[in-house]
Image (cartoon, rainbow, N blue to C red):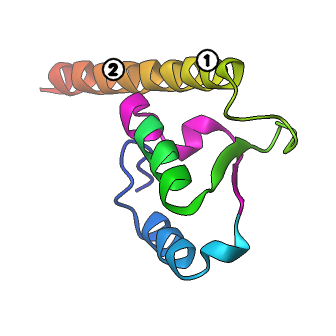
Amino acid sequence: MNRSDTFDRPNWNALEEFLQKRRDLVQYLVVLELDRFSRELTKALQKIDELYQKYKIRVVKVSEPISQDSSSPSSFLMRGIKLLIANHELNLIRSRTAQAMLQAK
């Protein structure tokens, strides 16, 4: 099952293990969309900060130019908005699932 609300996933754990061992080789973690990175706003922001603080790795979307300063206030605002929308979608999914389960009883 693909869970975008937690970082306790086998592939994520393998990636972090690689980053710990080979931090000198990686400057960026490129993701297709931020909601594929995480749909939990606070967890995503914490993990993005942790990756930078521990390894100096910046998380960027594939559609963003690498040259764009991802630490600028505008980039931080846009990242926050995109993650907030992803978090909202996660909450909608959870709500619809709970409603469907109640109706199925």
Position of the N terminus, as image quadrant, is bottom left
Residue sitting at x 53%, y 70%: 15
Residue 84 x, y percent position in the rendering = 49, 20
What stretch of residues is rendered in magenta?
27-44
The answer to whether residue 87 is above or below residue 57 is above
**Looking at the rendering, which quadrant does residue 60 occupy?**
top right
Disc 1 is placed on an element classified as helix
> Furthest residue to the left?
105
Residue 72 x, y percent position in the rendering = 70, 26
- Near mark 1 (Cα within 10 A), the count class, few <14, some 14-19 or many ≥20, is few
Q: Amino acid at mark 2?
A: Arg
**Which numbered disc, 2 or 1, marks the residue closer to the eye?**
1
Residue 57 x, y percent position in the rendering = 63, 56
Q: Is residue 4 left or right of residue 33?
A: left
Numbered circle sitting on residue 87: none
Residue sitting at x 35%, y 22%: 91
The answer to whether residue 84 is above or below residue 55 is above
Between marks 2 and 1, how big is the CA–CA gap?
A: 29 Å
State yes or no: residue 88 in magenta.
no
Q: Is residue 8 left or right of residue 76?
A: left
Numbered circle sitting on residue 77: 1
Residue sitting at x 33%, y 20%: 96
Disc 2 is placed on an element classified as helix
Q: Which residue is mark 2?
A: 96
- Near mark 2 (Cα within 10 A), the count class, few <14, some 14-19 or many ≥20, is few
State yes or no: residue 35 in magenta.
yes
105 or 69, nearer to the observer: 69
Query: Which is nearer the N-term, disc 2 or disc 1?
Result: 1
Q: Is residue 74 left or right of residue 76?
A: right
The answer to whether residue 99 is above or below residue 33 is above
Q: Amino acid at mark 1?
A: Leu
